[in-house]
Image: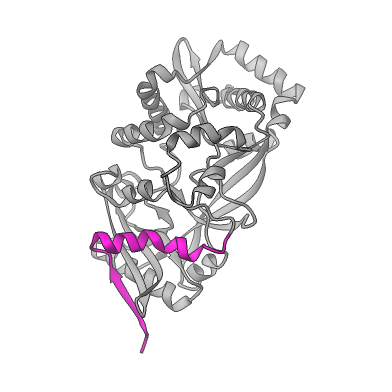
Amino acid sequence: MSSYTVIQVTTSKLLNAFIDFPYQLYKEDSNWVPPIKSVYKDLFVPTKNPFFKKGDMQLFMVVEKDKIIGRVAAIDNTEHNELHKENIGFFGFFECIDNQEVADLLFEKAAEWVKEKGRCALRGPVSPSTNHESGFLVEGFDDTPRLMMPYSKVYYPDLVRQSDFVKVKQLWAYKIASKDVANTPKIERVARLIKSKNKVQLREINMKKFQEEIHTIVDIYNRCWSDNWGFVPISKEAAVLMAKSMKPIVEKSLILFAEINDKPVGMIVTLYDYNEILKKMKGRLFPFGIFHLFNARKKITWLRMMLIGVIPEYRGKGLDALLYYQSSVNALKLKKEYCEGSWTLEDNDAINKLASMMGGQIYKRYNLYEKAI
């Protein structure tokens, strides 16, 4: 008889235990970055996370003798299924000791919950959607994750495969040296030609109209990514939260818009890799405060390019390459030598070709898995 018990998270106390578990699991792992607990907890609160407008989730934990040894979220994303004409459920926020029986219990519970919702397959990890941390790390365990990117145990891919999941998609992260883009004469000439030929203007984000600018970013994102595998649009509510969380940490020269006839047609969004600071804060905002993050950014060595996109009717003109180039020039001015471009789909040939042209090297890979239930 198994000594493991599955617990459904139904109280604030259990939610706190769910959130705390990774802090124990990764306490000896120098690469893991503890999330800020007060911010992280909001992901699970329906009144604070816009995901719950069109989705639902239930949290489960496995315990042994009152000790938590695994956790998972079963997720139902109605918007995803309606948009992609699928009938799948998801799992996310998965953390587990290296024990196949425990992992199987977690996956079975998640499958059972989404099946009750009428779903016929289970896919993940997404936490809670592809607009958030996605995938199990399969390459690049020797490095700290960049800002808003996942990190996971080396044995997770084995646990999920042995529970009859198969890989359904791989996500790539590129390491880009700013100087390899900004200081290459050929790239500079091409960028200048693209700018002149298309009569395009590049401008930095206007911090005085920050909320309005965030809406522009979201609009471009939703138009650019709508045909991508796993895409879920960002809502206006999510945009408001994004603006609130991003504004104190934005470097305006790293968020650029490409405009033609005063119309925004493309963008690139790059942020400082604040994980380098968050790692030292051990999940506590107090006594540091958000302004500590802002003031400490001179010590940050990496950037993360989160988004680069051109709306469909303006593609094929090289505007993405122009944005890539100018962002790298600005990064060098800030004395930031490296940038991670992440994530891209393994079969997004256009963006992967561009990243390679700019000297990017794939240095981390993440897998998403699926099985019928």
Q: Is residue 307 left or right of residue 192?
A: left
Q: Residue at x 30, y 45 (%)?
A: 51
Above or below — where is 8 with respect to 290? below
**Magenta segment, which residues?**
1-29
Q: Is residue 348 visible?
A: no
Q: How is the image coloured?
A: one colour
Q: What quarter of the picture does the N terminus occupy?
A: bottom left
Q: Is residue 251 left or right of residue 107?
A: right
Between 118 and 309, the residue placed more toward the observer is: 309
Above or below — where is 297 with respect to 82? above
Residue 281 position in % (x across, y down): 49, 48
Determine if the magenta segment contains residue 154.
no
Which quadrant of the structure image shows residue 68?
bottom left
Residue 373 position in % (x across, y down): 35, 68
Between 323 and 133, the residue placed more toward the observer is: 133
Judged from this view, the residue extending furthest toward the right is: 185
